[in-house]
Structure formats: C-alpha cells, structure tokens
Image (cartoon, rainbow, N blue to C red):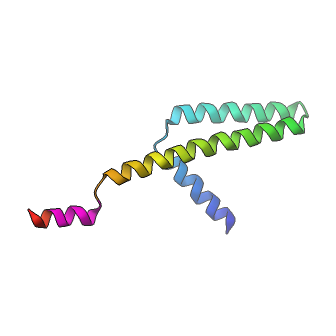
Amino acid sequence: TMLKQLRARVTLIRGLDIERGERMRESVEGARRILAAIRARAPDRARREAEEHIRRAAGLAIEAMHQSSSAAETVPSRRARRSQGRKE
C-alpha cells in the first residue's frame, strides 16, 4: 500500500548517514513554525510552513542518497572482491 511504501522510504532516509544533529534541529524548528501558525489560526501560513518543511526534508534526503550511492560506487561488490581473491 501507499502507506507501507512511504514508511519504507522514511525508514531508508532516516538510516542514511546525514548530519543527524543538523537534520533534527531543522526538523524541530520546522515543526515549531508549523505549530505556531496553527496556534495563530493562520492556515495559509501553516500550509506554507509545512510545504517548506517537506521541501527541506526532501532536499536532505536526496543529498544523502547521492552521497550514499557515491560511496557505494567506490566499494567493490562482493562478486568483484571474490574474483580478485581468485586471481591472486
């Protein structure tokens, strides 16, 4: 289902090596801005803050995935390591 797919992506993103302290700080700040807008009964501002919060999270996730895939490309695969061992 869509919920399971979303949950799987969130789990993947959380598992990536992002500067966790920075991500947490930004997440908390974004949530506070959303809550402040809700408390002020400013739905348009709350929507904008929520959209920006998601954009920032997506940007961090994309950056982390790029870093993760770059790192994975530099590590030889298990098959390549095995074949190297046989040649020596």
Q: Is residue 14 magenta?
A: no
Residue farthest to the left? Answer: 88
Residue 16 visible in the displayed image: no
Residue beneath the point at 64% across and 36% down: 27
Toward which corner of the image does residue 56 lie, by quadrant? top right
Q: Where is 6 relative to 38, above or below?
A: below
Toward the viewer: 69 or 21? 69
Based on the displayed image, in which of its 4 quarters is residue 84 positioned?
bottom left
Residue 2 image point, x, y percent:
68, 65
The residue positioned farthest toward the right in the image shown: 41
* Placement of 60 over or under 76, stated as above or below: above
Q: Please state the horizontal and vertical placement of residue 35, each as a whole percent of the image.
A: 79, 34
Horizontal side of 68 relative to 78 (left or right) equals right
Is 48 situated left or right of 72 in this image? Answer: right
Name the side, left or right, on which 17 lies relative to 1. Answer: left
Q: Is residue 30 visible?
A: yes
Who's the residue at 50% across and 45% down the image?
64
Q: Main secondary structure of the magenta part?
A: helix
Total tally of numbered discs in the picture: 0
Residue at the extreme bottom: 1
In this rendered view, identify the residue nearer to me: 13 or 67.
67
Quarter of the image with the C terminus is bottom left
Q: Which residues are magenta?
A: 77-84
Question: Residue at left 30%, top 53%?
Answer: 75
Where is residue 79 shown, x and y percent of the image?
A: 26, 66
x and y percentages locating residue 74 in the rendered image: 32, 51
Residue nearest the observer in this picture, 21 or 85 = 85
Q: Name the quarter where the N terminus is drawn.
A: bottom right
> Residue at point 43% right, 49% down?
68
